[in-house]
């Protein structure tokens, strides 16, 4: 029998049900952005790697303010979220050359929101055939790149987009 070890997964399993407070409110506080996987900050929203990604390059855009719906956003927040979505799409295409990208928002726990009450958008690069037996049967994802490499590659691409 072959075994695949995903050591990072234990951190998620051990803490998933014990997390208190809002993940995105904790992340938005100033500090070491790199250690919290924050790639870019805007005036009203920020771009962060998903620490437990579906695919390499999986990022999220979160609003700074604790608000749980699109209707609750101010026009300035909508602009910042849309700007970061545009930049993340362009950076993902530059770095990973995906064949498609999923953009998803889950509003409310019943809709699958892992962090209920704080609006965030998932941006996931996709390739034909990127779902295999490991995720469909084995409930395991195999990622070809660690988060540090993903962070470095996307940070560089976003920097190049500013020029």
Image (cartoon, grey):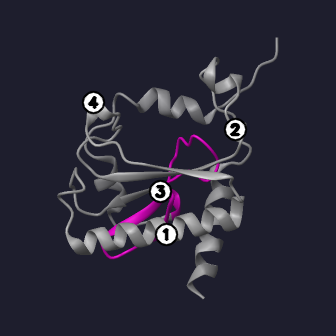
Residue 85 image point, x, y percent: 46, 65
SS at circle 1 = helix
| Mark 1 crowdedness (10 Å alpha carbons): few <14, some 14-19, many ≥20 | few
| Left or right: residue 53 compared with residue 130 | left
- Farthest residue in the top direction? 1
Residue 14 image point, x, y percent: 46, 27
SS at circle 3 = helix
Nearer-the-camera pick, 61 or 85: 85
Q: Residue 150 in magenta?
A: no
**Image quarter of residue 161:** bottom right
SS at circle 4 = helix
Q: Which residue is mark 4?
A: 110
SS at circle 2 = loop
Residue drawn at point x = 62 percent, y = 44 percent: 55
Q: Which residue is mark 1?
A: 86
Query: Compared with residue 69, is residue 20 higher up or lower down, i.e. above or below?
Result: above
Q: Nearer the viewer, mark 3 or mark 1?
A: 1
Query: Compared with residue 80, is residue 121 higher up or lower down, i.e. above or below?
Result: above
| Mark 2 crowdedness (10 Å alpha carbons): few <14, some 14-19, many ≥20 | few
The label number, if any, that marks residue 36 in the structure image: 3
Along the polypeptide, which appears first: circle 2 or circle 3?
3
Distance between mark 2 and mark 3 Cα atoms: 27 Å
Distance between mark 4 and mark 2 Cα atoms: 27 Å
Along the polypeptide, which appears first: circle 4 or circle 2?
4
- Farthest residue in the bottom direction? 163
Residue 71 image point, x, y percent: 19, 57
Provide the residue span drawn in magenta. Answer: 34-59
The label number, if any, that marks residue 130 in the structure image: 2
Distance between mark 4 and mark 3 Cα atoms: 27 Å
């Amino acid at each position: 029998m072959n075994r695949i070890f995903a050591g990072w997964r234990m951190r998620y399993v051990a803490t998933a049900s014990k997390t208190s407070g809002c993940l995105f409110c904790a992340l938005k506080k100033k500090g070491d952005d790199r250690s919290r996987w924050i790639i870019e900050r805007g005036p009203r929203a920020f771009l962060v790697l998903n620490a437990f990604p579906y695919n390499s390059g999986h990022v999220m855009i979160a609003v700074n303010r604790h608000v749980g719906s699109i209707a609750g956003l101010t026009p300035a927040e909508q602009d910042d979220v849309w700007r970061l979505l545009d930049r993340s799409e362009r950076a993902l295409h530059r770095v990973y050359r995906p064949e498609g990208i999923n953009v998803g928002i889950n509003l409310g726990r019943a809709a699958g929101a892992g962090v209920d009450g704080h609006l965030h958008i998932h941006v996931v690069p996709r390739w034909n055939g990127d779902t295999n037996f490991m995720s469909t049967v084995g409930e395991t994802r195999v990622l070809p790149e660690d988060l540090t490499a993903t962070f470095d590659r996307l940070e560089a691409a976003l920097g190049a987009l500013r020029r």
